[in-house]
Amino acid sequence: MKRTITLTSSIQTEVAPKVAADNRILPALTRFAANLTGLVYSLFGFMLLIAFWYFISRITEGGLPTPLSTFVVFWELVKDPFYDYGPNDKGIALQLGSSLSRVFLGFLLGSLFAIPVGLLMGANAFCRKVFYPVVQILKPVSPLAWFPIGLVAFESASMATIFIIFITSLWPTLINTSFGVASIPNDHKNVAKAFGFSKWKYLTKVLLPFSLPHIITGLRLSIGVAWLVIVAGEMLSGGMGIGFFVWDSWNALSLEKVISAILIIGLVGLLLDRGFSFLEKKFTYSI
Amino acid sequence: MSYLRIENMEIAFRTPKGNFVAVKDINLEIEKGQIVSIIGHSGCGKSTIMNAIAGMTFPTHGKVTVNGKDVKGPGPDRGIVFQNYSLLPWLTVYQNIYQAVDAALKGLSRDEKHELVEKNLQMVNLWEHREKYPNQISGGMKQRVAIARAFAIDPDVLLLDEPFGALDALTKASLHIELLKLWNLTQRSKTIVMVTHDIEEAIFLSDRIVVMNNGPASTIREIEEVHLSRPRNKKDTVNQPEYLAIRERLLGLLMDKVSIDEKDFYKEEAAA
């Protein structure tokens, strides 16, 4: 009897490390395989898009530049992104940088306004009833409609651009924040009540942790809106930025540059979204 | 003068369809150190009575007094274990208890609070799991955390709102024992009021069982005294004649038709 026990235990000690090693390698392998197949699928999608693009450029006989000629121009742009030959001729990275800094400034101001107001609207039924109709009226207004107001208020096209980013990017954050706060389950509120949480403790241990994922989702939507708005805004305001670059390229009749800019705008938008969805995952607790 | 008194209590809620009376004419006196169960069908206002003692809802008539003082809101003299654990999912097991202790016992120093949390987590054997989050532990463990949290603020009255309702039979049975152990550890000085719809659970744990009528406007139907000797244990207690007799009586009170009418079967058959 005793011998069988020692026997099984010795077998187990021999087998156990192998199993543990497999447990570490296998998930990594499956993850790698999943990433690889994902990559293959997306490559296939892009190939279809490029084929379609080529097809259209063939039909229009040069009306739309071919993928190859566009790629040559694209390469020219990204090869030397930081050159600066005066106000109307700057590298693509400088244009992007100027757009991004405006986007972040407008987005930051918008968030600084939207989060506290959203918290207030979520927590207080009176505030919600008073402000919600206002929000619903202002939210669907096109960003460009705000531009003249920005111009009058700040007397500067650059400031007006930041203003329209501020005013159009704050709504998703505001609405998500107030929704998050308003949907705190009664269970959590009851715990706070039963144990006599102070206002501060309720704010930091119940309200904010619960609403944080909602707030970050709002921020993610907001930065997306801000990035959409900047291109339109800079087309109007001119001077500098990726939107101005698109307009300038169009005036110089270089559709290759316009399409390259579209690709770059899309890529940056994707990166911004990925950044915020990373934050979203990081701050989401599981129930 | 009893420790916990409910006098002529009526609780009504305003709804869009008019006034809804949940419970009325509730008179109940509970001595210090007693375990009392409130039992009844769903929607009979059990939890409403519990919430009134907790100070989360207020009577429209009558009043609740604990230790001679009117209940005016929640307080650290009454600890609550909620129906669905109600742990905060973004806090660890340790922090869930610490934040409650920190809020409820303002006079203690930081070290004393940490000591209390450790003592109570040890008591429910969860000290090793203190750094885990609620979603990483089982339902039974969550309920032990909730019980430890209620005990940690050292309340005189412990309010349990269907505390074991969501647990499987085995976990439930071991938690019953654990609850009684904790009660013994505090020299049976804590008054425990528990809402349940489990007859066996009520008899095994309680000194008295309050049976409710069906709602709306439900009243107390009967109060059953349980004189089973303590300490109780599952194996022996459930076979005692008194246990079986009480069980029979409660079944009769709660289910007007304990047996299925065989005649219906033959009637259907004849019709067919």
Image (cartoon, coloured by chain):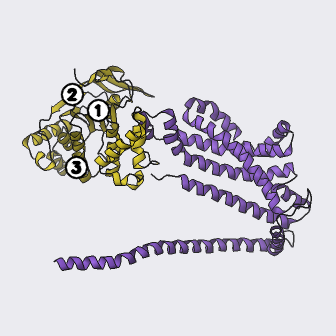
Chain colours: A purple, B yellow
Measured as percent of width and height from the top left, residue A180 is found at: 55, 43
Label disc, if present, on residue B157 of the rendered structure: 1
SS at badge 3 = helix
Instruction: Name the amino acid type tagged 1.
Output: Val
Q: Tell me which numbered mark, 2 or 3, is placed earlier along the sequence.
A: 2
Label disc, if present, on residue B31 of the rendered structure: 2
Instruction: Name the amino acid type tagged 3.
Output: Ala
In the picture of the structure, the residue carrying the numbered disc 3 is B173
Q: Is residue B13 left or right of residue B147?
A: right
Measured as percent of width and height from the top left, residue B266 is found at: 15, 49
Q: CA distance from mark 1 to mark 3?
A: 22 Å
Chain where mark 1 sits: B
Q: Is residue B89 left or right of residue B10?
A: right
The image quarter containing residue B189 is: top left
| Residue in the picture at 87% in, 72% down | A62
User: As rendered, which of A59 and B177 lies closer to the eye?
Assistant: B177
